Image (tube, rainbow, N blue to C red):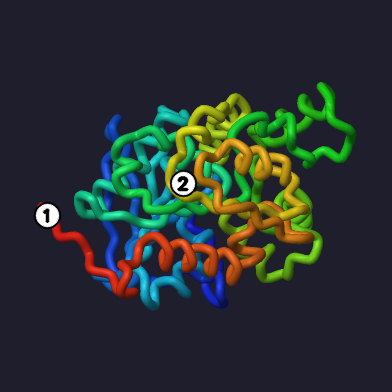
C-alpha cells in the first residue's frame, strides 16, 4: 500500500477522523475508510482519483465535517488500502458498494463526490442496486467516461495516433516517481494543475501522488487506458453536477461536456478558468460549496434538518 507522505500542516494536512473502519469488497479486497464529523449529520461520500488517497480531500473534509458526516475511503492499492490483483472498473464499483454498505444504514442517502478515477467509480457503479439505494446526488470532478488517453493534452501536439501513443507510454510508465524535488513538482504541476496553482497546492498534490506505489500506478493506468463507461453515464439517474478546469490536460473540458450531454439528470457543468485536473485542491471552496448545495437540495428534509435512518429501519 502507499507510503503516507502527505503534508503535515496547512489547509491540505489531513484531519484526524472520528473513526476508522475496513470494508471488504466482493472479491475480498480490504478498503480503508475514514469517517469525520457528527454521526447524525447528513452524509457525504468522497471517492479519490488515480494515484491519490483520502488525503486528497483534506480541504473538503475539514470544512464539511463541521456539520456533515464525511466518509472518505482509499481506492484499492492506494493510501491504506492494500493492493489487489484485480484492477478493473467492476472492481471500483464493487468497492464503492462495499463502502456504502459499511457506512450507511439501509435506505440512507448521501451525496457522492468523485474526482477523476473516483468519478469513473461512480459511473461504473451507476447501475448497481447498492449505489442507487444510497445516491441522493452526485458531483463529478475532473473526470471522463472514455477516450481518456486519446483526448488528453499532456503531450502538446495535435491530436492523432502519435499523441495517443506518446500519452499512453508517459501515463503508463513503470518508472518510479522518486522523491518530491523541484523538478518533480514542476512536472506534476504541468501535467495535472493550472499554471497559477500556488506552491502549497502543488506540494500537497506532489506528496500524495508520489506516495502511490509504482506497481499500483502502472496497473491502474492500463485500466484507464481501456476504460469505456459511456453506458454507465447514461444510467446515472441521480441528479449530477459536473466540475472541470479549463486547463485540465488529463480530462479536458470535452469530457465534461460529453458527460453533460449524456447524463439523464445533469445539473449543469461548471468550467473553472485556468484550473487544471486537481480541482478539489485548486478550488477547494468552490468544490466544497457544490457538495453543500447538493446536500441542502437533495439530502436535507423539507424542514432543513437531517435525521439519520436507523439500522434495520
Please say if 16 is above or below 134: below
> For residue 66, which quarter of the picture?
bottom left
Q: Quadrant of the C terminus?
A: bottom left
**What residue appears at the point 34 percent right and 74 percent down from the top-left corner?**
304
Among all residues in the image, which is located at the extreme right?
157
The answer to whether 290 appears left or right of 244 in the picture is left
Is 139 in front, or is 20?
139
* Measured Cα–Cα span from mark 2 to mark 1: 34 Å
Residue 40 in percent (x, y) is at: 24, 70
**What residue appears at the point 62 percent right and 31 percent down from the top-left corner?**
146
Residue 217 in percent (x, y) is at: 56, 38
Identify the mark nearer the N-term, 2 or 1. 2
Residue 250 in percent (x, y) is at: 70, 43
Is 100 in front, or is 183?
100
- Residue position for label 2: 78
Residue 211 visible in rendering? no
**What residue appears at the point 55 percent right and 47 percent down from the top-left corner?**
266
Residue 161 in percent (x, y) is at: 81, 22
Using the image, tell me which numbered label, if any, was put on residue 188: none
- Residue position for label 1: 313
Amino acid at each position: 500500500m502507499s507510503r503516507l507522505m502527505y503534508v503535515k500542516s496547512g489547509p491540505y494536512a489531513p484531519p484526524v477522523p472520528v473513526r476508522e473502519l475496513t470494508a471488504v469488497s466482493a472479491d475480498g479486497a480490504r478498503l480503508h475508510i475514514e469517517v469525520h464529523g457528527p454521526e447524525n449529520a447528513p452524509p457525504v461520500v468522497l471517492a479519490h482519483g488515480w494515484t491519490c488517497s483520502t488525503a486528497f480531500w483534506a480541504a473538503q473534509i475539514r470544512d464539511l465535517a463541521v456539520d456533515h458526516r464525511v466518509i472518505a475511503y482509499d481506492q484499492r492499492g492506494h493510501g491504506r488500502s492494500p493492493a489487489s490483483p484485480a484492477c478493473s472498473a467492476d472492481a471500483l464499483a464493487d468497492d464503492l458498494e462495499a463502502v456504502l454498505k459499511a457506512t450507511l444504514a439501509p435506505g440512507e442517502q448521501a451525496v457522492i463526490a468523485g474526482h477523476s478515477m473516483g468519478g469513473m467509480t461512480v459511473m461504473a457503479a451507476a447501475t448497481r442496486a447498492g449505489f442507487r439505494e444510497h445516491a441522493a446526488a452526485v458531483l463529478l470532478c475532473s473526470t471522463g467516461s472514455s477516450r481518456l488517453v486519446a483526448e488528453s493534452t499532456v503531450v502538446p501536439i495535435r491530436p492523432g495516433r502519435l499523441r495517443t501513443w506518446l500519452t499512453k507510454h508517459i501515463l503508463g510508465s513503470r518508472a518510479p516517481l522518486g522523491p518530491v524535488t523541484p523538478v518533480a513538482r514542476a512536472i506534476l504541476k504541468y501535467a495535472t494543475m493550472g499554471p497559477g496553482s500556488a506552491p502549497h497546492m502543488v506540494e500537497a498534490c506532489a506528496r500524495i501522488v508520489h506516495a502511490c506505489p509504482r506497481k499500483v500506478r502502472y496497473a491502474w493506468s492500463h485500466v484507464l487506458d481501456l476504460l469505456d463507461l459511456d453506458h454507465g453515464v447514461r444510467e446515472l439517474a441521480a441528479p449530477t453536477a459536473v466540475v472541470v478546469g479549463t486547463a485540465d490536460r488529463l480530462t479536458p473540458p470535452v469530457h465534461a461536456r460529453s458527460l453533460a450531454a449524456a447524463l439523464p439528470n445533469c445539473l449543469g457543468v461548471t468550467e473553472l478558468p485556468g484550473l487544471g485536473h486537481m480541482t478539489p485542491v485548486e478550488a477547494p471552496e468552490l468544490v466544497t460549496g457544490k457538495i453543500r448545495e447538493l446536500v441542502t437540495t437533495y439530502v436535507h428534509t423539507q424542514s432543513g434538518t437531517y435525521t439519520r435512518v436507523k439500522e434495520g429501519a
